[in-house]
Image (tube, rainbow, N blue to C red):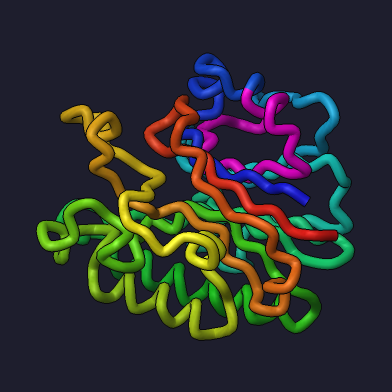
Amino acid sequence: MKIISWNVNGVNACISKGLIGFMKKEAADAYCFQEMKATKEKMPNIEGYHSYHSIAEKKGYSGVSIFSKIPAINIIEGIENAEFDREGRTITAEFDKFFLINVYFPHAQHELFRLGFKLSFNNSFLEFCNKLSKKKPIIIASDFNVAHKEIDLANPKQNMLNAGFTKEEREWFSMLIGKGYIDTFREFNNEGDNYTWWAYRSQARERNVGWRIDYFVISDSLRPSLVSARILADVYGSDHCPISVELKG
């Protein structure tokens, strides 16, 4: 089973840059998109896929979608917390053998204005995951908006106090991994210069001055099924690139 995750930074803008052609070429079993920035009425209808959406109350903001060849058994919008769910950050599709959670984590913002909000979201999200994991394994597809370790961004020293690389955000991610989850990409690749987001300014992508903030994180019990985890850095259409994971079965 192949799943692709991508922060598209506006689904309609990404469609104009080749999103549908990319989907047809990859032919993944499921796609998880973040930052859709569209109403349900404006969501694309992708032939051969069932679609599920969680939309923010604020127009043109956030929003996550799952497109799946296999219909979900059940869909959960949000994480059962109204404060966070109004921002359209999480949607969960239940399948026979696992839960697929698509989540767009808050950004801590300039001068860490929203760091407290993000950490509260993180903890509520972990509670949600712990609840689901009692039933079956979990696959998390996400823009976590954090670079976990120094290897995960081009300029760690300059960003120690900046959003996405604070001690608090990184420690939470370490805690998540310590709770029985796996950063799938690092199961196959422990080298630097592997990024998933680049600022639009200063030709950052051309110079590969980026951050790895998009991850597939899975329950440890799925490790024997893990076949591959990749960063599709040559695919354009957003300030992020897609990532993929493949599992047996």
Q: Left or right: 63 with respect to 155?
A: right
Q: Position of residue 222 (x, y in %)?
A: 72, 72
In front of the other: 61 or 200? 200
Q: Position of residue 16 (x, y in %)?
A: 53, 14
Q: Position of residue 98 (x, y in %)?
A: 78, 66
Q: Quadrant of residue 28?
A: top right
In front of the other: 184 or 142? 184
In front of the other: 121 or 27? 27
Specify whether residue 109 is in view.
yes
Residue at x 61% of width, y 65% of height: 79
Q: Please check the rendered image and state whether residue 23 is part of the magenta-colored stretch, yes or no.
A: yes
The part of the chain drawn in magenta is: 22-40
Residue at x 54% of width, y 46% of height: 243
Residue at x 41% of width, y 73% of height: 173
Q: Please check the rendered image and state whether residue 152 is part of the magenta-colored stretch, yes or no.
A: no
Figure check: 137 above or below 157: below
Q: Left or right: 96 with respect to 197?
A: right
Q: Position of residue 76 (x, y in %)?
A: 73, 59
In front of the other: 220 or 139? 220
Q: Quadrant of the C terminus?
A: bottom right
